[in-house]
Image (spheres, rainbow, N blue to C red):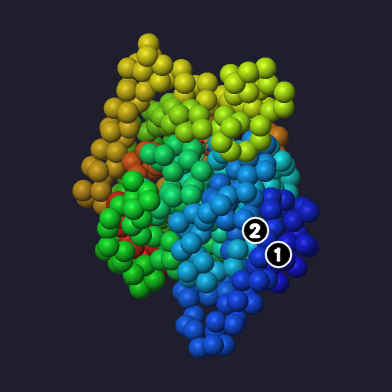
């Protein structure tokens, strides 16, 4: 059914970069056989899953939507892929994204942009745009994405589905092609909150192969979905409903808050005073980390190698010039600059200090409130091509998701109505490792 749906829709949506039809059929047959032989059903038995193309899959191309990795055929599975296999899902294929997860519209895919299923003239968001579009158009049951500054939540919002960025360290990053290692986190994109809880249950947990993996007990997420939010205290940051937020988005968020009130929760305006510095802080830190992480792509170790180099340095130069797209080069240059000896203190170190202030903003609010709620993005999806020439405007689309990433706390985007025919996302943010409360509130609301 999944492949039939893909055949019907993907010419217009362009969510997939690689299909795994033979492999999927073989694993479905194998799962069936195990069941016939009396084996138990795994937690996600038989569910067709799509995987973002920066998560490595053994024997299945993993391109990060980059020309550089257009031939990269990994010899191992990412930790999350192993966990999905243990839960008995079926991998349908690899999903389109912005190159190396740098972007918020999918237009930085070096192959072709994925499109928004609600209106294919519009972006699906990014960088996990293929992951969101494939779930929204019914091609897969759920997908995995990665979120560094909003890349799960924002495309989920634009495509009218549910996207969860777990607490930093809850899900192993082993086998996720690194963009900004202190921010990257894998999470589920699903049609509803219950599915999100199930997929999180399957992928969360300590992994010694990821040095930033948190060694915490994994609670039962599904049992958190009680439908009861009575007495929950919600803080609503005034910075998330002020300047730059589309009035129709604001209206949808206020209506959602009313619904929470009618369910017995309370809300109050709060302040996250360092929000205005978050985008600048993020672009310095994420680009710095990216410039270091992407140094491994040299034409020798992975991916495509340039032809006819004059010498070794020329091999690096040609391979990187040909392999990386414009946005990736822009970030490598910005990051290299921010980390260089003369500027490190002024930019990188300063940004690290501001990051601490941003995290403290969240700590302060969470002393009195259980959740923070606001929009996922300041607007609904925009037209393909509308913002490509203007990286700064594009960067500002992440104003509501980036602070959460810098603080490392969990957040989910759930649909909360429409503006001009396009979905609006509500962002529900929780304390570190308190995914249960985040999921409970999202589930009671949806
Ligand atoms: N849009 C943001 C960026 O371009 C976030 C991307 C992400 O979360 N991977 O960096």
Near-viewer residue (144 or 87): 87
Q: Is residue 321 visible?
A: no
For the question of whether residue 333 can be seen, the reply is: yes
> SS for tag 2?
strand
Q: Position of residue 277 (x, y in %)?
A: 38, 28
- Residue 225 image-quadrant placement: bottom left
The answer to whether the beta carbon of the residue marked 1 is less than 8 Å from any atom of ligand 1 is: no
Residue 232, percent across and down? 29, 60
Under tag 1, what secondary structure? helix
Looking at the rendering, which quadrant does residue 184 occupy?
top left
Image position of 190 (left or right of 321): left
Please report the residue visible at 56 percent of the width from the left and 36 percent of the height from the top.
301
Q: Which residue matches tag 2?
A: 93
Left or right of 357 on screen, residue 332: right
Identify residue for label 1: 21
- Closest to the observer: 31 or 231? 31
Q: Is residue 103 above or below residue 192?
A: above
- Marks 1 and 2, how far apart at CA: 8 Å
- Residue 338 located left or right of residue 109: left
User: Residue drawn at (30%, 55%), measured in percent from left and top?
Assistant: 433
Q: Residue furthest top?
A: 342
Against 266, is 237 above or below?
Answer: above
How crowded pointer 2 is (Cα within 10 Å; few <14, some 14-19, many 20+) is rated as many
- Residue 55 in the image: above or below residue 43: above
Which of the marked residues, 1 or 2, is nearer the chain's N terminus? 1
Question: Can you give x and y, in whole percent of width and height, for residue 60 in the image?
Answer: 63, 55
Q: Residue at x 48, y 76 (%)?
A: 42
Q: Are marks 1 and 2 in contact (CB under 8 Å)?
A: yes
Where does the image place residue 126, in percent across and percent down from the top left? 58, 44
Quadrant, the N terminus: bottom right
């Amino acid at each position: 059914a999944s492949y039939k749906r893909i055949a019907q829709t993907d010419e217009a949506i362009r969510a997939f970069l690689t299909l795994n039809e033979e492999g999927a059929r073989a694993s479905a047959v194998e799962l069936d056989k195990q069941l016939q032989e009396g084996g138990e059903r795994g937690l996600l038995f038989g569910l067709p899953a799509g995987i973002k193309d920066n998560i490595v899959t053994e024997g299945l191309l993993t391109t990060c939507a980059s020309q550089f990795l257009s031939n990269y055929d990994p010899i191992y599975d990412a930790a999350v892929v192993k966990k999905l296999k243990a839960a008995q899902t079926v991998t349908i294929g690899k999903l389109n994204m912005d190159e190396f997860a740098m972007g918020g519209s999918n237009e930085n895919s070096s192959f072709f942009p994925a499109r928004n299923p609600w209106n294919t003239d519009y972006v699906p968001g990014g960088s996990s745009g293929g992951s969101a579009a494939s779930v929204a158009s019914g091609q897969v049951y759920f997908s995995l994405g990665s979120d560094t500054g909003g890349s799960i939540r924002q495309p989920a919002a634009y495509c009218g589905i549910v996207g969860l960025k777990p607490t930093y360290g809850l899900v192993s990053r082993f086998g996720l092609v690194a963009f900004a290692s202190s921010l990257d986190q894998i999470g589920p994109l699903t049609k509803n909150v219950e599915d999100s809880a199930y997929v999180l249950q399957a992928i969360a947990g300590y992994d010694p192969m990821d040095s930033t993996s948190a060694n915490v007990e994994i609670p039962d997420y599904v049992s958190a979905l009680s439908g009861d939010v009575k007495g929950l205290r919600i803080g609503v940051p005034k910075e998330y409903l002020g300047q730059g937020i589309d009035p129709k988005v604001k209206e949808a968020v206020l209506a959602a808050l009313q619904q929470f009130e009618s369910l017995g929760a309370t809300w109050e305006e709060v302040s996250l005073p360092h929000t205005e510095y978050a985008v600048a802080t993020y672009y310095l830190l994420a680009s710095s980390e990216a410039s270091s992480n992407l140094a491994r792509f040299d034409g020798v170790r992975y991916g495509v190698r340039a032809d006819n180099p004059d010498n070794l340095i020329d091999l690096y130069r040609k391979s990187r010039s040909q392999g990386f797209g414009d946005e990736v080069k822009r970030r490598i240059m910005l990051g290299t600059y921010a980390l260089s000896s003369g500027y490190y203190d002024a930019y990188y170190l300063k940004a690290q200090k501001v990051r601490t202030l941003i995290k403290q903003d969240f700590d302060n609010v969470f002393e009195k409130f259980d959740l923070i709620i606001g929009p996922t993005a300041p607007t609904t999806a925009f037209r393909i091509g509308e913002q490509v020439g203007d990286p700064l405007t594009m960067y500002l689309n992440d104003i509501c998701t980036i602070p959460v990433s810098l603080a490392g706390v969990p957040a989910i985007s759930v649909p909360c109505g429409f503006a001009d025919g396009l979905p609006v996302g509500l962002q529900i943010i929780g304390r570190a490792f308190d995914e249960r409360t985040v999921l409970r509130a999202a589930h009671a609301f949806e």
